[in-house]
Image: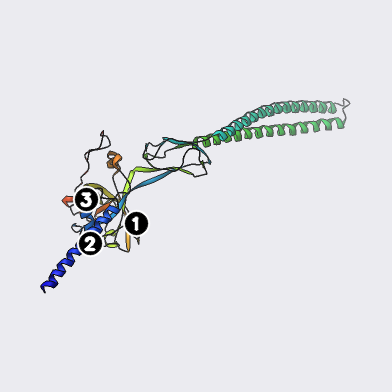
Amino acid sequence: MRPLRRWSIAAALVLAALLLAAAAGWVLLAGGDLRALPETLRGLLGKDGLPAGFALGNGRIEATEVDVATKLPGRLLEVRVREGDRVAAGEVVAVLDTEALEAQQRQAEAELRRARQEREHALAVVEQRDSELDFARRDLARLQRLSRSDRFVSEEQVDQASTRVQTAEAALRAARVQVVATEAAIEAAQASIERIEVDIADSTLKAPRSGRVLYRLAEPGEVLGVGGKVLTLLDLSDVYMVIFLPAPAAGRVPLGAEARLVLDAAPEYVVPAEVSFVAPRAQFTPKQVETQSVREKLAFRVKVRIDPELLARYETLVKTGVPGVAYVRLDPAVSWPEHLAPRLPTWSSNASAPPSN
């Protein structure tokens, strides 16, 4: 029995060594460091050291990505930012060539000037037709008076005068219609100019919101189509970690529940957060996500979001893609364990430099 016992102990030690080596390899491949090894072992073994009323899940730091794209096709003239640059909302980040649009604008302005001249001409024609109608009416009235007094005015003359009045009235109506047509042409030319001005303004690409440049996707000289992407920005006011929890835990997670994030790259810090979203339907978890029971087949997606005010203080330290663990409190009446009390770096974005390691 003693040899068998010794072999059992040796096998257990070998198994533990293999498990330790596998966990260390997983941490390194995930982009972390060996300081996160104890946390990883607790997650793999399902022994998180948490009292009842808590749940945990693995994930990566993510942020909302916003694409800066072209509304119109054109040649990219200038890109003013590079990857990693901080941009403010409304800041000009790229410019498209607008020579063709400027030529169209000059053409539309010429059309506007011509339409205004045609309107002046139509107004003059209206005055002329109005004068002719007034003369025709007076001539008809005079002939009618002479006809009633037997002053040698034939009925044919009266009919001709009446016809001239009707013709003058029709000519006046036509002239007035021409005035309306020229006014419509003026409005169309003005609308064309405004549209071209909008196109020229849209050719200057601005950051839709504050953030950090994640990708620079196009370079000056490239011809882009409608919707061509130039940059991808990270909205650093919306940073979160997505984890997957099994149904028993997800069903108890209230929106707004307190959470804590511990990153593999900095396990000495505990970042406070809150649950901002719980998926209404279960799904298969991605391959890179490990739940407490090691890859539950079906789990609910939960988003754990960091407070924007806290992010503003540590903006320069925020990096996406960093793996870590999110702890979620399921029962508000349960107190957080001491090792999950919030611990943050003393350095903030207002300081001159981060602390040395």
Quarter of the rendering occupied by the C terminus? top left
Residue at the farthest right position: 152
- Foreground mark, 2 or 3, reads 2
**Residue 35: assigned label:** 3
Q: Nearer the viewer, mark 3 or mark 1?
A: 3
Q: CA distance from mark 2 to mark 3?
A: 18 Å
Left or right, 249 with respect to 7, comes to right
Q: Residues within 10 Å of mark 3 (few under 14, many from 20)?
A: some
Residue 55 at least partly seen: no
Q: Quadrant of residue 174?
A: top right
* Element carrying mark 3: helix
- Residue 18 is marked as 2
| The image quarter in which residue 188 lies | top right
Q: Residues within 10 Å of mark 1 (few under 14, many from 20)?
A: few
Q: Which residue is mark 1?
A: 279
Q: Position of residue 127 (x, y in %)?
A: 70, 26
Amino acid beneath label 3 = Arg
Front residue of 208/193: it is: 208
Using a 10 Å C-alpha cutoff, classify the residue at mark 2 as few (fewer than 14 neighbours), some (14 to 19) or many (20 or more): few
